[in-house]
Amino acid sequence: MAKSRTQFICQSCGNVSSRWSGKCEACGEWNTIVEENNAGGIAGGPQALRSPRKGRIVALTSLAGDIEDAPRIPSGIAELDRATGGGFVRGSAVLVGGDPGIGKSTLLMQAAAALAAKGNRIVYVSGEEAVAQVRLRAQRLGVAAQPVELAAETNVEDILATLGEGKRPDLVILDSIQTLWTDLADSAPGTVTQVRAAAQSVIRYAKSTGAAVVLVGHVTKEGQIAGPRVVEHMVDAVLYFEGEGGHHFRILRAVKNRFGPTDEIGVFEMSDKGLREVSNPSELFLGERHAKAPGAAVFAGMEGTRPVLVEIQALVAPSSLGTPRRAVVGWDQPRLAMVLAVLEAHCGVRFGQHDVYLNVAGGYRISEPAADLAVAAALVSSLTGLALPADCVYFGEVSLSGAIRPVAHAQQRLKEAEKLGFGQAVLPQGSEEPSGSMAGRSFQPGTLTDLVIRIAGSLRGDSGRASDDDVA
Ligand code: TYD
Ligand code: MG
């Protein structure tokens, strides 16, 4: 058999080196290199030692031809199906990542129960919790009566042998990939080598049998799926389950999907009876809004094909520091620096002596440049102490020249705002005019300066309070 070889493998990027060092040469991370004993399997193991076998002849085929139909298994949980692009795909492997305690096991137990109730064969293998713990959760979720088949096991060979018995399962949930280990690799569970080898076996099982497999992966506090970055490349779809501490809502986000869109999200709320679907996220993110206060602007954003309204909050306060503080939660730091620079350079608004804090309400994360205009409005509003009208939404991208550029899906954003009772909008020129109850109540600034003048102009009214009728 192969001689046992000691390797040093970076747990962050998977780089293999022959000796230990404090810093990984490949990815530059510190303290990530771990000694792993590789007696078989994975990197240059038995393949290199075995004598080459004669290959089997594979039948070649054409692009056109019959396709087996409906390879998806929809769960009936609309928010989950939205994120996966219409349900789990047979013969595919999905990685569901997220912080410990965010609710991955809860989500998958609910999905398992929903699918089992529709007559699918579902196997739930827990490597982290004992059977009793899983049962307790199922009871709490009110799904204990569903015919989900359950096991607490961590050895991949045993799991695959079990799955080979009886009718092929429609969906197999393995919770979590970090607890699995295979006889093929010698290192401890959770190391890159084990995780990669285990994932490989399981993915091979999915492809060869046509069962859908869900792997659960924990994310480290650095935001990576611990160890198995490599697994992300091996699976067909990667979903992240995210949420902000202290908030009840959770977002399931597709970051990779070979069979569907990657810009869709599913929104849930964690309750005492498990995860509840949130079909109108805007209401959730705007739920805690108070009456008018300076520094708050509502951004009409898009997540995939769905509009989402969120409140952006800015606090601009005099700084006692030599270098004023800029802190951002839920948005891009460089993007904030850019908006501040444009406001300073083109609009004469000075932030040099001020700390700037920016927060997206509800712990939500925005990745769209279309939020520029809302951010700028919130910043100017906080600096001047002038509250923006409470029933106004903002969207538009700010260019470095100070011009405001149109963004996609203007009509959908406006419709969502109108549905939620907003009466006016600030949007880029060239976008379609709002219709319905917002008609005639929009402001389309050509440059950021126009918006700043508009906000400062509301000072003309009674001492510093913007009237509700003022646009912006
Ligand atoms: P869990 O699914 O175990 O998280 P993960 O698998 O991602 O580590 O969820 C754990 C948290 O969810 C835990 O703090 C308790 C909470 N929870 C509820 O609030 N309500 C519920 O009905 C359940 C089952 C869990
Ligand atoms: Mg769990």
Image (tube, grey):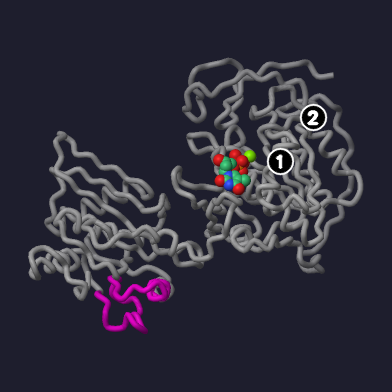
Quadrant for ligand 1 reads top right
Q: Position of residue 410 (x, y in %)?
A: 39, 73
Residue at the spot 69% in from the left edge and 52% down from the top edge:
142
Q: Is residue 59 above or below residue 220?
A: below
Which residue shows up at 75% across the image and 44% down it?
A: 124
Q: Where is the C terminus found, in terms of image quarters? A: bottom left
N-terminal of the pair, mark 1 or mark 2, is: 2
x, y (%) of residue 122? 79, 51
Q: Which residue is mark 2?
A: 47
In which quadrant is the N terminus drawn?
top right
In this picture, which residue range is highlighted in magenta?
A: 414-443
Q: Is residue 278 left or right of residue 315?
A: right
Gap between marks 1 and 2 measured at Cα: 39 Å
Q: Is residue 353 left or right of residue 130?
A: left
> What residue is rendered at 24% in x and 62% in y?
292
Q: Nearer the viewer, residue 455 or 371?
A: 455
Q: Is residue 208 left or right of residue 353?
A: right
Disc 2, SS: helix
Residue 84 lies in quadrant: bottom right
Residue 430 in the magenta stretch? The answer is yes
Determine which residue is flagged by label 1: 134
